[in-house]
Amino acid sequence: MFILAWMQSFALEPRRETGIFQIDPLTPYIHYLPDMAPRGRVLVVHGLGASKEFMRTISAALTDGGFEAYDIDLPGHGDSTKGFSGPLAQQAIGNVLKTIGTDTIVVGHSLGSGLVVDLAADEYLPTLVLISPPPTPLAEIQAGRVLVVSPQFEVPRIKAFAPILVDIGYPRVKLWEPAWAAHSSPVFTPAHLRYIVEWLGGNGRSTRTLARLIWIIVMCVSGVALGIGLMPGQRLKAIPIPIPPELVRYVASFGLTILLLKVIVPLSWLRLFGTDYLISFLFLGGVLLSVQKREVPHFNALNLLKATAAAVFVIVVLGFIVGTHVLHIALSNGRWWRFPFIAAAGLPLLWFDELTVRRIHPQWKAIAVTVVTRALLWAFLMTGVLLLNRADAFLVLIAHLIVLFWILLWFAAGIVYRHTQDPLATAIFAAIVQGWAFAAWFVTI
């Protein structure tokens, strides 16, 4: 099933080529080419914390509709080796447009649409699609026509800005509010993408978004099943773990962590936009918890080898083969050196999890405690960045996604634990996967 899904997904991909625009700053791109003569040219710009891979679905739909599309990485994102800043990102968009043609249609999402709006305040752009544009101070928008996409369940401040943008650009600006949609829904939902393609003048009936998403899901599910089959589980020993004292440990450690981070963020030298605070939180919280446990790790070379192999499987199969359809997975030159430090920083907390939460029985209690401890982590993170470290408030936008990632990682690590029954090997597996993911995803500065 995995091979079949991969073949079908590959067959549905439009022709594309990758490269780097030799401009200032150097800008990586994916160029999508339709099978017929192009109806027009589109530049697709992602949002903060995303990448050109995140926009592959909308770029492929535009290509299905008859357009050629350029999908770029802004500075600090994806394969870009430059650090992020707003002015530099706007400069990259402007220089790309000068390279491929100023008559290019521009599609922006979130921060990307905000940068495009800023650009359109100073120079004329013929056609714009602005998906969830953030509030931006401007007096006018110079464009031939504009589609503002404001989903029903949008962030309130972004939702409130959409009518203002329509008033500024009236009558050239059209507001579309897709129902039952959130911030990133129009980037992936087949019906929404079809509407955008047709508004631009393309053939919406030829889009193949639904088929692509189905085969990606089949590939993901069969890949997970393959991984489980390669690591058969063993019967676990029941170890009595009192739940209330362990939850108190988490609360006390996380509370002390946010107080320490008010004084110093020890891993700020990683130079990650807002998220070096997150890595520092995981490190300090994990150290404080591990010191309380006082259990010496037991090294088993075979189990460590199995755990490492399992991490490689997740990164290659579920990451590079499956995940790259929607996420940036590769580590560029500016990201490789961060990977081991992020992995090491997360290890203490992950090891403590394996010594406590993983051993709770029955299983439903362990799952409940996992959800509770992740909720506590989220709550303390939000308290820290909103009350004590406001400069890192960007975490508010992605913390819920990070918590979801942690929960999924805990279940994945459970497969390794049931096979090896080795807390340290399981923690190393989780640390490698988490370190790789964060090094690939987080914005560099």
Image (cartoon, rainbow, N blue to C red):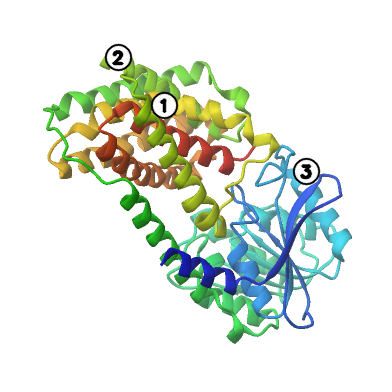
Residue 88 bears which disc, if any? Answer: 3
Query: Could you tell me if the residues under marks 1 and 3 are in contact, i.e. CB atoms within 8 Å?
Result: no
- What residue did someone put label 2 on? 296
Q: Earlier in the sequence, mark 3 or mark 2?
A: 3
Q: Nearer the viewer, residue 431 or 146?
A: 431
Look at the picture and state if 289 lies above or below 377. Answer: above
Task: Say whether residue 253 is left or right of residue 359.
Answer: right
Residue type at the position of mark 1 = Leu
Q: Earlier in the sequence, mark 1 or mark 3?
A: 3
Q: Residues within 10 Å of mark 2 (few under 14, many from 20)?
A: few
Quarter that holds the C terminus: top right
Residue 347 bears which disc, if any? Answer: 1
Q: Residue at x 53, y 69 (%)?
A: 7
Tag 1's secondary structure? helix
Task: Say whether residue 188 is left or right of residue 103.
Answer: left
Coordinates of residue 257 in the picture (x, y in percent): 40, 21
Residue 382 can be seen, yes or no: no
Task: Say whether residue 338 is left or right of residue 370.
Answer: right
Q: Residues within 10 Å of mark 1 (few under 14, many from 20)?
A: many
Look at the picture and state if 172 lies above or below 45. Answer: below
Look at the picture and state if 95 lies above or below 340. Answer: below
- The answer for how far apart the CA atoms under marks 3 and 2 are is 48 Å
Q: How many marks?
A: 3
Q: Nearer the viewer, residue 41 or 7?
A: 7
Look at the picture and state if 218 lies above or below 390. Answer: below
Tag 3's secondary structure? helix
Q: Residue at x 61, y 48 (%)?
A: 48
Coordinates of residue 349 in the picture (x, y in percent): 37, 26
Q: Nearer the viewer, residue 361 or 232?
A: 232
